[in-house]
Image (spheres, rainbow, N blue to C red):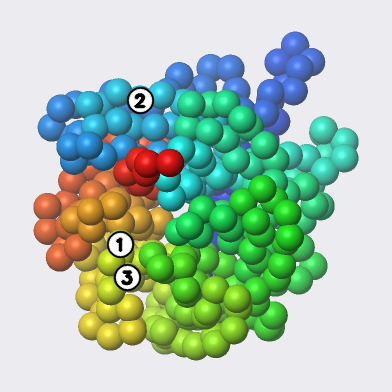
Amino acid sequence: MGTHRLRRVARQALLHVPCLIAGVLILAGCAGGTPGPEPVPPTRLPPAGMQIAFTLTGLGEIWLLRADGSQRVLARNAAHPAWSPDGRAIAFERAAPQGDPFSAIWTDDIWVVHADGTGLRRLTSSPMTENEPAWSPDGRKIIFTRDPGYELPEIWVMNADGSAKRRLTRDANRDDDPAWSPDGSKIAFASSALDSFIDSNIYVMQADGSGRRLLASGHGEHFGLYEPGWSPDGTRIVFAQDDEIWIMNADGSDRRRLTEVADYSWADKEPDWSPDGRWIVFEREGSDSDYKWSGVLLVRPDGTDLRRLIGPEADDPKWRPPPRSR
């Protein structure tokens, strides 16, 4: 699954390092760290009416970027935001030590919080790492990845309140990056043989875990395919391949590259469609020489109009769905 997996592990390791200040364990950011994301100038605002949640890696916080450029924190000691379909809540992963707070063993659990910061609830609490949450389009279920450590990760599903957890994939592959189709009938995901970080393919299955079939193969490609995301109308899928952003039809045909990496000096990943289908937001992780290009970027589905929204240490961008009437 390529260098993005190694970068994700390194990023999570940074989030998991506790800071000792006057003998107190701080779980979200260290004193002297970044006070918040950089200001967004008017020339780099999200499209009108749009809002984007993102992870501020330096502090381990999830922030909201509004269309007017204003920003506010949504959750602390948190990463990988996933909006509920009505835009009123966010599921996310939170790291915690196992047992002793000074333990070297840290795992992720899935939590949920209302968009106004109230109603914080923990949905998983096993000794295994549980992350990459994604809501079903009807808001009733959440899919996620469970990694026991001694076996390969698999995809699970639970009710939105954390009950009725059930395993969906059962094979000898590493299965992760699950994404619901807009009609809720299918789940796209990445799968690699054994514990390979190279040969990753994109599969699709029915929402109950049946009917697994190969959608697009990364075999022979440098870093494989991963992180699929459906277009709002369900006709196309955006994904990361070889540290670039690509797009294809929902049946796997007509694969096209949207961004191009220069000498692997940066990695483009975590793509997500805008609710109106006119934009794709993604994370660009750059090297020191390309640090000015690191952060959250936008591009059109045809690969044009590339622009940077917010800078270094901002990643995991997710569009906020438009509000629904109750």
Which amino acid type corresponds to the residue marked 1 in the rendered image?
Pro
Which quarter of the rendering shows the C terminus?
top left
Q: Nearer the viewer, residue 284 or 249?
A: 249
Describe the element under mark 1 as helix, strand or loop: loop
Question: Residue beneath label 2, please?
Answer: 71
**Mark 3 or mark 2: which comes first in sequence?**
2
Q: What distance separates the C-alpha of mark 3 from that of mark 2?
A: 30 Å
Q: Nearer the viewer, residue 242 or 168?
A: 168
Q: Is 84 located above or below residue 214 in the figure?
A: above
Which amino acid type corresponds to the residue marked 3 in the rendered image?
Gly
Left or right of 257: which side holds 134? right
Q: Are marks 3 and 1 in contact (CB under 8 Å)?
A: yes
Instruction: Tell me if mark 2 has few (under 14), some (14-19) or many (20+) residues whose alpha carbon lies within 10 angstroms of its own.
Output: some
Q: Nearer the viewer, residue 299 or 124?
A: 124
Q: Nearer the viewer, mark 3 or mark 2?
A: 3
Residue 209 percent coordinates (x, y): 60, 78
Q: Which mark is residue 232?
A: 1
Name of the residue lying farthest toward the right: 100
Q: Are marks 3 and 2 in contact (CB under 8 Å)?
A: no
**Mark 1 or mark 2: which comes first in sequence?**
2
